[in-house]
Amino acid sequence: MSRERGPSRRVFALGLGALFASACDRPARPAGEVAFWFSYGGNNRKVLLELVSRFHREQSAVRVVPTFQGDYFEGLVKLRTGLFVGAVPTITHVVGEVVPYLARAGVLERLEGVGDAVLSDLEPALAQFGTFEGAEDEPLVALPFNRSTPIAFFNRTIFRELGLSPPTTWDELRAVASRASLVGEEARWGFECPVDWWFWTALVGQAGGRLVEDGRITLGGEPGARALELWQAMVHDDRTMRSPPGRDFNAWEASNGDFLAGRAAMIWTSTAFVRYLEENASFPVGAAPLPGDVRRAVPTGGTFFVMPKGLPAPEREAGLAFLRWMMQPQQASEWARRTGYMPVSQAGRRELEATGFFREHPNFKVAVDQLSVAQRWPWAPELFRVQREAVQPRLEAAVSERLDVRKVLAEARLVAEAG
Amino acid sequence: MTTRLVLEGLSKRFTGRGAVHTEALKKLDLEVRDGELLVLVGPSGCGKSTVLRLIAGLEEPSEGRVLLDGEDLVRVPPQARDVAMVFQGYALYPHLTAAENMAFPLEMRGVSKVEREQRVREAAAIVGLGDKLERLPSELSGGERQRVAMGRAIVRRPKLFLFDEPLSNLDAKLRAELRVELVQLVRRLGATALYVTHDQGEAMTMADRIAVMRGGELMQLDTPRTIYERPANAFVAGFVGTPSMNMVSVADSPRVAGLTLGVRRGATCGFRPESVRFVKDGADTANPTEGVRLEGRVVLVEPQGAETFVHVDGEGFVVRARVEGFGGPELGSRVVARVGAAELHWFDESGRRVEPLA
Amino acid sequence: MSLRPTRTFHPYAMLAPTLAVLALFCLVPLGVAFHKSFFAWDLLTEPEPVGFGNYRALLASGELGELIVRTLAYSVVVVSASLTLGLALAVALNREGRFYAFVRSAVFSAYVVSWVAVALLWLWLLDPQAGLIARVSKGLGLTPVDWLGNPRVVLFTLAGVTVWKITGYAMVIFLAGLQDVPRSVLEAAALDGAGPWQRFRYIVWPLLRPTATFVATTSLILSFQAFDIVRVMTQGGPVRSSTIFVYAIYEQVFVNMRVGRASALTVVFFVLLLGLTGLQWWLWRKSADSRVAT
């Protein structure tokens, strides 16, 4: 952080510094130590920490100190505050939507140093340049590791009993949800999906829309509205869909919980939960790609590794060494196998195919196959703000209170454009 | 309207830690007659305040009855008893003015505002509080607060007044003045009142009758004069009178130190200081078998103005004597004193008074 | 005796340490916030001057009005309920005996527990599926209320949890106040013909007024500062229905990365609190003038 700052900003920094009990001056790190702030919980955390231990067994020059920093958004708050007061980790990971913003703010280190061998092996659709469009001339600042798409999970027992198969269109989605719903004592939702930016984006793409068109934030225009109307219809008219309560990932956990408890026949969530759901369900779990409307489309999700700018060279190199190791086929495939995220290494994916893993575990392959219809995010610095401030806070009310979706989106556009 | 308060077999036990009972009052029988000012006196812990609180309804008796004009009050809550009480600390309502304090009992009884004001004015005039009515208790002196408390008690014209050491928070001079005012007030109102004090002097001066208590029991109930002249037992004899009565235990020996007793009529012999008369040595002509003869040295002289207290040490036994004015023997001088046989009080082993043979 | 200082700087020297702390932790940050409220700034890029833009945005979006109404609603419930319950409990439990001592400690213990622990506890109790309250109401054949999921209910749920936590404190202060009411004064009132209710109405309550004012002030301050419980239990939702002032400030700066907007909110909050303090001070003075205070 070499930029000049005014005195009042320094005072502010002092205040924030005191607030987080972190010193203003970056603490010097021992040579070879990599501070790694992560946001993985549950099984993902376990797998990650085991990978780190293996990394330590295989070499001794670099020592990784992983620190849990809460969920993605909490982690981001800490990263931003850390960046401001100059107390940053060597490596952390952030959601895709925030990468353009951080890159434009100039706080991210270039990561070409990870090496061509690694870069050329990365799955194009999951790496930075394949994830974003309009970023061909931007520097490489983000490396993929846990990458996902939304997929559908269904309760095979229920589906078999009712003779249902996973829906491939919106109409089928409504029909299947309706067939699988039960009212009364043993109430069951046919469909459950967090009313969340990510799934809305998927619906917008399926309805033929894009969030940003010709550099203007359109929030999908008419397809954006139709996406919300589908949810409204399923919640209020069909009464077949539950919009789980809770903010951000609380809602995701709620829908997973309902699915596992048999209270929801089908849910949409991240492929990241394949392993978790399979291991915790008392019934066979099926996975399927999301349906289409005018077309098939899904966004990608998950996080990228990033490195704050301006670290001492040895620390930077140590961080790159760890990233390099993590991107290698063996680690990438182990991570995918044990979690449900997609392998970011092409060689790693081929290995999973060759060893028959995908044949034995078809649920793990759904997201990989779905990559063919994955939509790229716009390389827009305001993308994150559009998500967090303009769209996400309005979705829940729009669906639960059945607001006029065009008015809601117009309002969101106004907020998004105001910047 | 006449008032008659009767206490029948009134007992009160307090249960303390570990279910240990303390008997504060043991089967008390007592009658307060109409228009009488009866003073309950005794050392602290004798149960006198408990009597008052039982009559007021602030405590429930363990046994016995409280009859006011024949009605048993035991199950009646304090607010429904027609009894007014003046507390030791006055217990004025700190957030109300003197007038509001005095109007409070009327207000609680639904007396109209006009009448309230009228009666408060009257009461204020009676207790001599005319111009301080709009002040808060914190803005009044101790004596004035006392008057407010008095006013609050009389304003509602209760059947019975209870006074719980109402003067003990005042300095001696003010206490003496208010004592007089209080007696006059009670007499003027023709009120029936029970007055509790630990000060036997207060009891003597104020009471129509005195009830002396000790350890939850009634020791004697009679007029001040009888209590003084014919104490029913050694305790009453010692408690009433200042300086208190000289008491000589004569159980074992006819001669106690420098004291020579004549005919013995009990285990303990008592005589009041004013009964002691100094005689010139050699001029002692009285019959040595009657009364008391004392030889000793003057160890302390306490002149009070109108009287002087002389302490005579007869080889370890100190006798208090009272003489008029500043007269009497000098400090350090050897003296002989006598007490006439008729002025001796005799008590048996249990402390009960032994009447002289007729 | 003169109370005039021998040197004019003496009083200032005495005040200096307090003033320094006050300046460092209150005045300077407030000044910085005031300054920053005229900028758009995300902590990472250069601040951009926007004039009254932040204030205008807060007003135009209607957010400010909603925030104030929500925060006041929460405060009114918290203050009135903790005051009433605290007083009722104090009166009911102002007795001797081990049982009452136990109940008193039990009620007060909630106050000692940290906010986060209380929030987590209630999150669990109020869980619509597995929560104790949902199970009990199902067992009684009642329709379970979605305490944290219903936008019309959630603010009052949070207020209820807050009341649960702080009532013990109000009770203890009231108990101290009650013990300052001399027993003989209550006995005098009883003999003056006042029944239990009248004794409370005409004697106890007027004497507890200063205590009540104190309790009301502290719980008002506390209710305006509420944050932890919102952060843990609802994150301001659903649909912003439990976003109260301090949480909104947090959300602006730490979620939306809008330091300027957050600063503007802080300034408004400060002015609001200043106004409330002024009002309270004025009411206090008024009641003191009418000689109700001791």
Image (cartoon, coloured by chain):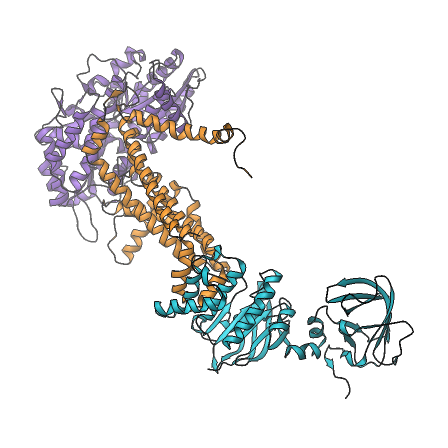
Q: Which of these two is toward me, B78 or A389?
A: B78
From what the image shows, is residue C6 above or below residue C98? above
**Residue placed farthest to the bottom in the image?**
B358
Q: Quadrant of residue B236?
A: bottom right
User: The chain coloured cyan carries which letter?
Assistant: B
Identify which residue is drawn at 52% across, 63% down: B146
From what the image shows, is residue A160 above or below residue B338? above
**Residue placed farthest to the right in the image?**
B282
Q: Position of residue B115 (x, y in %)?
A: 37, 70
User: The chain coloured orange carries which letter?
Assistant: C
Is residue B257 visible in the rendered image? The answer is: no
Left/right placement of residue A239 relative to residue C214 reads left
Left/right placement of residue A143 relative to residue A378 reads right
Is residue B39 visible in the rendered image? The answer is: yes
Identify which residue is drawn at 69% across, 71% down: B239
Q: Position of residue A90 (x, y in %)?
A: 37, 19
Identify which residue is drawn at 87% across, 81% down: B289
Q: How many marks?
A: 0
Q: Which of these two is toward me, A224 or B151?
A: B151
Left/right placement of residue B228 relative to residue C210 reads right
Q: Position of residue A404 (x, y in %)?
A: 11, 38
From what the image shows, is residue B137 above or below residue A198? below
Q: Position of residue A335 (x, y in %)?
A: 31, 26
- Location of the N terminus of chain C by quadrant is top right
Give the drawing colour for chain A: purple
